[in-house]
Image (cartoon, helix red, strand yellow):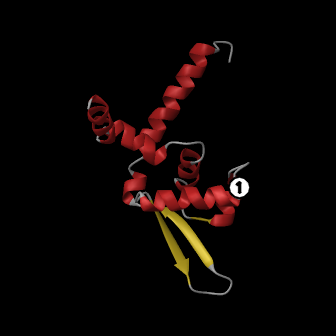
């Protein structure tokens, strides 16, 4: 019974939910690119060294389902798809900026010669 209580608590933890939405290797990097403005799939793929097309597609779909990016499809030949941040996605900017600042401080403390 205790395991059910723990899983219920974890499911309702706001910090854990945030990590579910932006966690993983690629999502923060995708956000970084989209903070610069609207991007097409190819632009994102070129900017994210090492990501496969399949992984990028999966990550973009998850981020769209979570309501942090918008996918705009233009009915033309060849097809054109653009990705942008929703207002919810844009609201992550100060959080990501704070994470960046913390990471810089941590690296400096761990490697003072840098």
In the rendered image, which residue does mark 1 sit on? 52
Query: Within 10 Å of the Cα at label 1, are there few (<14), some (14-19), or many (20+) other Cα atoms?
Result: few
Q: Quadrant of the C terminus?
A: top right
Q: Is residue 104 above or below residue 97?
A: above
On screen, residue 108 versus residue 94, left or right, reads: right
Front one among 65 and 79: 65
Front one among 51 and 39: 51
Q: Quadrant of the N terminus?
A: top left
Q: Quadrant of residue 5?
A: top left
Label 1: state its secondary structure. loop
Residue 85 screen position, x and y as percent: 46, 59
Q: Quadrant of residue 44?
A: bottom right
Q: Specify whether residue 85 is in view.
A: no
Residue 14 screen position, x and y as percent: 32, 40
On screen, residue 57 versus residue 67, left or right, reads: right
Name the residue rendered at 28%, 41% in the picture: 12
* Count of numbered labels shown in the rendering: 1
Residue 6 screen position, x and y as percent: 30, 32
Q: Quadrant of residue 83?
A: bottom right
Name the residue rendered at 44%, 44% in the picture: 20
Q: Is residue 105 above or below residue 93?
A: above
């Amino acid at each position: 019974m205790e395991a059910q209580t723990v899983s219920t608590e974890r499911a309702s933890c706001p910090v854990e939910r945030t990590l579910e939405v932006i966690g993983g290797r690629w999502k923060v990097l995708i956000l970084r690119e989209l903070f610069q403005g609207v991007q097409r799939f190819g632009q994102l793929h070129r900017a994210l060294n090492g990501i496969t097309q399949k992984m990028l597609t999966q990550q973009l779909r998850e981020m769209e389902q979570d309501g942090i990016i918008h996918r705009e499809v233009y009915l033309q030949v060849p097809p054109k798809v653009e990705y942008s941040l929703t207002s919810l996605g844009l609201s992550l900017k100060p959080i990501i900026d704070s994470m960046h600042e913390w990471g810089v401080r941590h690296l400096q403390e761990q490697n003072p010669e840098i």
